[in-house]
Image: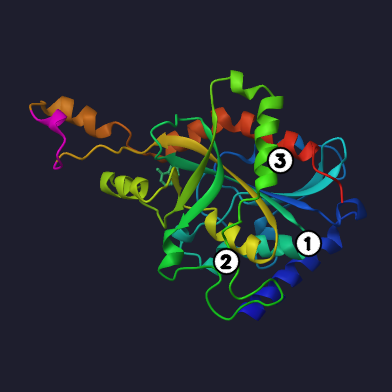
């Protein structure tokens, strides 16, 4: 229940805090690193540094996806030595975890005193202007699962975290979004091979990737990217009053053309091998997702680090 999740999160936070050097005791920023975006952890190598695998932390569920090792790192970032929590690897709803489990680590962060959450993920591009490797600053979301009742705040409200009916219209912090674009410019990343956009993230349960018809539906609903994470954590973070900035890395392009049985005139008259090539175009696959992640991860990490170096130290 809600009160139990508060108690558990408090317990976990207390057990972590007990092991921390005093310089890391009150982290203000947490960073959830998505698929292949955990390299940020390796940029924190100086003491004070605290690292624990999720397996070593009480109550924290373990991820089962390749490429999503789960660990928590606390360290200092930037010239102001801002204490931060890095979460490398997350658990997903499609693994069979409950929404409470998916969002537990976010609640632990809140109990550790975190007030700003930076979330990254790998996502499929629905906006035809996006290229693989582009970065999208989220400015809104479609919580498809939540609208029909699969929602992380379902059940008795955890009053210790926030109110029963939290607004989500302002979930994506304008000031932090501005800072993201400023950092992008300051780092001259515009001159590189990827672009930055603002867009709407659509949360789907997964684990299968979307069909062509589903891609067209999501696009029609106003989504720019689609993915299987992030929104539950954001809702829980926002419920407890955190400021949020979230980035999607576009790892594949969803196909918006009609399928072989649809009204696509292009496929009439194709022979078998042409048809096979046509059907494999834009087909999402996990290896491709991880590969695009590896390529773009450095820019994404530079962006986050630059933003953090400009954060005020409270
Ligand atoms: N993650 C990466 N690509 C995705 C896609 N096409 N759909 C959902 N989640 C994704």
Q: Where is residue 214 in the image (x, y as percent from the top left)?
A: 30, 49
Residue under circle 3?
41
Q: Earlier in the sequence, mark 3 or mark 1?
A: 3
Which residue is located at x 61 percent, y 56 percent? 170
Badge 1: residue crowd in 10 Å (few <14, some 14–19, many ≥20): many
Q: Name the residue under label 2.
A: 101
Q: Could you give the CA–CA distance between mark 3 and mark 1, rounded to whole angstroms?
A: 19 Å
Q: Earlier in the sequence, mark 2 or mark 1?
A: 2
Q: In which quarter of the image is residue 91?
A: bottom right
Q: Are marks 2 and 3 in contact (CB under 8 Å)?
A: no
Secondary structure, magenta segment, majority class: loop
In which quarter of the view is residue 125 placed?
Answer: top left
Q: First in sequence, mark 2 or 3: give its number.
A: 3
Q: Nearer the viewer, residue 157 or 53?
A: 157
Residue stretch rendered in magenta on the structure: 261-268
Q: Position of residue 305 (x, y in %)?
A: 73, 36
Tell me the residue that label 1 is attached to. Answer: 112
Q: Which element is circle 3 on?
A: helix
């Amino acid at each position: 229940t809600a009160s139990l999740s508060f108690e558990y999160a408090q317990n976990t936070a207390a057990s972590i805090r007990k092991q921390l050097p005093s310089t890391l005791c009150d982290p203000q920023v947490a960073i959830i690193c998505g698929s292949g975006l955990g390299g940020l952890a390796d940029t924190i190598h100086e003491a004070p540094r605290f690292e624990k695998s999720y397996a070593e932390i009480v109550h924290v569920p373990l991820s089962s996806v390749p490429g999503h090792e789960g660990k928590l790192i606390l360290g200092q970032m930037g010239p102001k030595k801002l204490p931060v929590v890095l979460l490398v690897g997350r658990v997903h709803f499609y693994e069979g975890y409950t929404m409470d489990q998916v969002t537990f680590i976010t609640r632990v962060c809140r109990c550790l005193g975190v007030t700003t959450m930076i979330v990254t993920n790998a996502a499929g591009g629905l906006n035809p202007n996006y290229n693989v490797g582009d970065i999208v600053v989220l400015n809104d979301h479609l919580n498809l699962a939540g609208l029909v009742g699969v929602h992380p705040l379902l059940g008795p409200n955890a009053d210790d975290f926030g109110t029963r009916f939290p607004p989500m219209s302002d979930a994506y912090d304008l000031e932090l979004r501005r800072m993201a674009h400023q950092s992008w410019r300051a780092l001259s990343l515009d001159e590189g091979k990827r672009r930055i956009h603002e867009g709407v993230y659509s949360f789907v349960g997964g684990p299968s990737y979307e069909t062509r018809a589903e891609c067209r539906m999501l696009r029609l609903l106003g989504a720019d990217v689609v993915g299987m994470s992030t929104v539950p954590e954001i809702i829980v973070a926002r419920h407890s009053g955190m400021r949020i900035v979230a980035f999607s890395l576009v790892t594949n392009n969803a196909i918006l053309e009609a399928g072989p049985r649809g009204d696509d005139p292009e496929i009439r008259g194709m022979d078998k091998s042409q048809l096979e090539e046509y059907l494999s175009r834009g087909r999402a696959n996990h290896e491709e997702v991880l590969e695009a992640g590896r390529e773009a991860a450095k820019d994404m990490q530079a962006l986050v680090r630059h933003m953090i170096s400009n954060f005020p130290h409270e």
